Amino acid sequence: MKKKQERFRIIEERANVVEPSKPIYHTIRGNWNSFFGNNNPITIELACGRGEYTVNLARMFPQRNYVGVDIKGERIWKGSTWALEQNLTNAAFLRTHILSIENFFAPGEVDEIWLTFPDPRPRKRDIKRRLTSPRFMQFYRNLIRPGGYVRLKTDNTVLFEYTLEEVSRRTDVLDLAWTRDLYASDLRPECFDIKTRYEEEFAAQGETIKYLRFRFA
C-alpha cells in the first residue's frame, strides 16, 4: 500500500499525466493540442494498462500525439515512467473512467482510437460494459474525426466475435477488416508488432491474437 501511494504522489507531479488532482483535468477537453504544444493528430489508447501502445507508437511516430487512458494510477505510473525515460514529449496519460471519455475530448479532436486487450466482460449482465458495446461505439463516433480508425486487438474470442457482429450490423461503418490470427494475417503490419504484457501472457497459453479495424462513415 505504501508503494502504491508513493506512485500516486509521483504521477500527481508529472507533466505527462492528467489526473483528478490537477486543474487541467477539468479544462483539457478541446485543448489537447495546446497541451502538447502542436497541432499534430491525436491517437488515444483506451483502457491502456501500462501503455505499451501509447509509448511505443509515440516513439515510432514522433509527428503524432498519443494519450493513454486508464483509471488505474499504478498502471499510468508505469507508462508515464517509460515515456519520461525515452524523452517522449508526444506521449501523455489521462486517469479517468472510459465512461467519462466525452468529458475529456471534444467532437473530432481524436484522430484514431486503439482498444488493446480490454476487459472482455464475459458475463451476460456485463455486456453493456464491454468497450465495443453500442453505447461506447457512440462515444467513439462522437469523438473521432471523419475517416479516423477504431482498432481492437484482443485474445478473447467471445469479445472479438461479439464486436465483429456489432460492427458488421451497423450501417455507418466503412473499411472493416479483421482476422482471428493476427500474426498469420496480412493485417499484421497495422499493429507494428507491439506486444503488451497481456498479449505475451495469452500467447504463451496458446491463444491466437484477434484484430479488427474500421472507420465510421
Image (tube, rainbow, N blue to C red):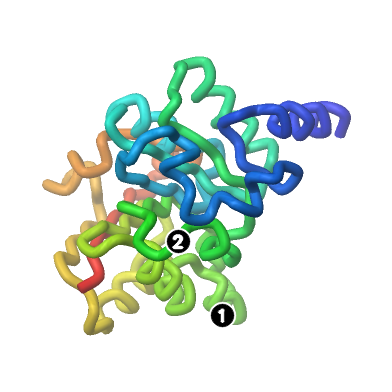
Camera-side residue of 108 and 182: 108
Neighbours of disc 2 within 10 Å: few (<14), some (14-19), many (20+): some
Question: Is residue 175 depicted above or below 50 in this figure?
Answer: below
Quarter of the image where one finds residue 216: bottom left
| Residue 133 x/y as whole percent | 45, 75
Camera-side residue of 53 and 127: 53
| Residue 124 x/y as whole percent | 56, 80
| Residue 204 x/y as whole percent | 43, 37
Left or right, 53 with reference to 4: left
Q: Residue at x 38, y 73 (%)?
A: 162
Quadrant into which the N terminus falls: top right
- The residue singled out by tag 2 in the image is 106
Under circle 1, the secondary element is helix
Residue 165 image label: none
Left or right, 144 with reference to 25: left
Question: Is residue 147 depicted above or below 61 in this figure?
Answer: below
Q: Residue at x 40, y 72 (%)?
A: 137
- The residue singled out by tag 1 in the image is 124
Under circle 2, the secondary element is loop
What amino acid is at disc 2? Ala
Q: Residue at x 23, y 79 (%)?
A: 172
What amino acid is at disc 1? Lys
Q: How many numbered badges does the structure rendering display?
A: 2
